[in-house]
Amino acid sequence: MKRLAFVVPRYGPGVLGGAETFARHLAEHLPPDEFEVTVLTTCARDLLTWRNEYPAGETRIGGRRVLRFPVDHQRRDAHLFRRLNDRANRCEPLTPQEQAAWLENAAHSPALYSHLARHGDDYDLLIFLPYLFGTTLYGSAIWLDKSVVCPCLHDEAYAYFVDVRAMLHSARGLMFISAPEQALAEEKLGVRHPAARLVGAGLEPFETNAERFRHRFGLAGPFLLYAGRLDPSKNVLQLVSHFVAYRQARPGRGLKLVLAGSGPLALPDHPDVVSLGFLADQDLRDAYAGATLLCQPSLVESFSLVLMEAWLAGTPALVHGHCPVTRHHVTRSNGGLYFTSAAEFAAALDWLLAHAAERARMAARGRAYVQAEFAWPIVVERFRQAVAGWLAGDDRGTPPPAIEDRDGR
């Protein structure tokens, strides 16, 4: 029996975030006769406030033991953190001292770190994700010989911080969930870890009812769906801007943009932009099935669960061509199109809306791609073999089954 701890800053069904969702699903899909899994997390749910909303202590989620620890708000200079964070988001360079100040004033849980220090021997491996938060940056340093980091990297300013790259170099192993994510680490960050493994993220089929969604939310005509955080970092404003321009140029088309998610972004008031807020799992699955296509405008993805879920629900995708990860998935699967400008967005929409049969074929190809590459039995086997290599102390490890690359990369 392999004893694993998943260390993640926020955890639970009500938590928005691709990395956090991946952590929960992986923990719940590992065979209990092979893996004894404990989740170490904080009491926070919201990514912006980091308020301690969940009670501290032990609970169970999805059959897994979960230990929650409070976030310490007394030690933070929230004003300094926001100022540095705004500069990083504007791609302004931060000095090493400013980077260290950003990390020091991020959300931290000393109680969680203390648990790791005292109980590290209770676990064979500690799996930390995603890379950016204090639970990973500080927690992984406590037991370097047991720490595996699943960074869920994006090509963003934080990934280039000195301490982030040092952490990735120093960990016992690295676990990547897409080939472009691993390429980012190796080619741009210069992190070529000998115990890096490409595992992927898992999905399984689910039931949908498109008409139930349309009836519940009063949507009769065609619509584009965005699912995720309403956050500037997800490029949602560009999507809305492109869509509004498209509708102004084609007033008779009767198309809507439906946004499923919550976040701090203030959206323009437009009759064809419908914001539904956070949706329950089944409502979101029904939304995928009811949509004409999924629009994923984000430039900073490490895998994109919503893209895969849309394909499983039978819906093609339109993604941003400047996102290496989503473009990689779309071009490998031929499950959709990509755009890099407002003109390309409009041209892609025109073509997709005019070719219903090809939309269906794209969706089918996307579904086949997900089932062939990211079904849970396949991902669990890759993870199983990666763990065997990390525990054996052999940096060459046991090569996991390769994720097929039809483009030869």
Image (cartoon, rainbow, N blue to C red):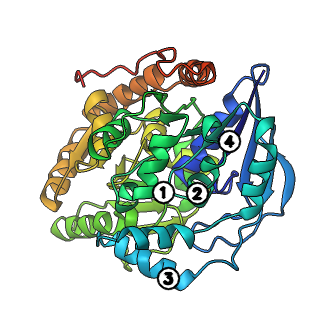
Residue corresponding to mark 1:
228
**Looking at the image, is 234 positioned above or below residue 122?**
below
Q: Is residue 203 left or right of residue 310?
A: right
**Element under label 3?**
helix
- Residue at 21%, 69% (x, y): give it: 245
Disc 2 residue type (three-letter): Leu
Can you tell which quarter of the image residue 334 is in?
Answer: top left
| Cβ–Cβ under 8 Å for marks 2 and 4 | no
Between 193 and 311, the residue placed more toward the observer is 193
**Element under label 2?**
loop
**Looking at the image, is 364 positioned above or below residue 307?**
above
Which numbered disc flags the more N-terminal residue, 1 or 2? 2
**Looking at the image, is 383 positioned above or below residue 177?**
above
Which numbered disc flags the more N-terminal residue, 2 or 4? 4
Whole-angstrom CA distance, mark 2 to mark 4, is 17 Å
Which numbered disc flags the more N-terminal residue, 4 or 1? 4
Whole-angstrom CA distance, mark 3 to mark 1, is 28 Å
Residue 166, percent from left and from top: 45, 49
**Element under label 4?**
strand
Residue corresponding to mark 2:
16
Which numbered disc flags the more N-terminal residue, 3 or 1? 3
Disc 1 residue type (three-letter): Gly
Disc 4 residue type (three-letter): Phe
Image label count: 4
Residue corresponding to mark 4:
6
Q: Residues within 10 Å of mark 1 (few under 14, many from 20)?
A: many
Whole-angstrom CA distance, mark 3 to mark 4, is 30 Å
